[in-house]
Image (cartoon, helix red, strand yellow):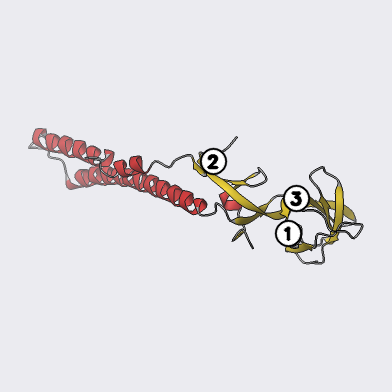
Amino acid sequence: MATSPVSGQFDYTSLNARNTVKKTSAEEQQDRFMKLLVKQLQSQDPMNPMDNAQTTSQLAQINTVTGIDKLNQTMSQMTGMYAGTQVMQAAGLIGKEVLSPGNGFRFDGSKPADLRVQLSEGVTNGMVTIRNEKGLEVAKVPVNNTGAGLAKVEWDGKKADGTTAPAGNYSISAVGQKDGKEIALNTTTWQVVKSVEFGSDGVGVYLANGNKTNFGSVIQIQSANG
């Protein structure tokens, strides 16, 4: 099913509307308090008037309440503005390649594939296995890096028999040795961004292979032609 480039429209109108209301709830609370205070002063016993400490205490209470209310309003506005900014930034990714957690990538038939493997401290003998769309093993590539971090692995497109693999979609998996045991390693790959979507869980980025990643998970960006 086709998806529009940018979906989940961000409501800037409602954001602006919140800034044009006649009175905030904080102002309304302050108005009510002042009216009650004036009424209390007018009806107080002249022989036993309210002292300054009582007045100051009540003023401090209303200032605290209105201050919190205004802070909440400001935070809500800032959250809305930040979300809108994320949508615009994510829209700029469409048509570009992003490096993000995943195992799918496209080989163009000639240019070496740039792959990445996440190594933790103490991992050795890393090995990447490359499979075609049918899930059949095509090649194995060793991970030369030994330090912790994101290790770059390059596949020249050669299959195990020495011939060049055809252009198409491939996937990778990786393992390494730690404390004498084989462990699975996380991988990251390059994929072209097809569309973005704004939802309740943030900004989603849809990739050419049909997978989805979060906007915050994007590690690197480059033009689609590398």
Q: Position of residue 177 (x, y in %)?
A: 86, 57
- The quadrant holding residue 22 is top left
Q: Position of residue 128 (x, y in %)?
A: 82, 56
Q: Are marks 2 and 3 in contact (CB under 8 Å)?
A: no
Q: Is residue 119 above or below residue 210?
A: below
The single residue placed furthest to the top in the displayed view is 43
Q: What's the residue at 47%, 48% (across, down)?
A: 87
Q: Are marks 3 and 1 in contact (CB under 8 Å)?
A: no
Q: Is residue 145 above or below residue 89?
A: below
Tag 3 secondary structure: strand
Q: Nearer the viewer, mark 3 or mark 1?
A: 3
Q: Where does label 2 land, which residue? A: 201
The quarter of the picture where the C terminus appears is bottom right
Q: Position of residue 129 (x, y in %)?
A: 84, 53
Q: Nearer the viewer, residue 18 or 3?
A: 3
Type of the residue with mark 2: Asp
Q: What's the residue at 59%, 61% (across, down)?
A: 223
Evaluate whether residue 178 shows in this view. no
Q: Where does label 1 land, which residue? A: 116
Label 1 neighbour load within 10 Å: few <14, some 14-19, many 20+: many
Q: Distance from label 2 to label 1 (Cα)?
A: 27 Å
Q: Where does label 3 land, which residue? A: 168
| Earlier-in-chain disc, 3 versus 1 | 1
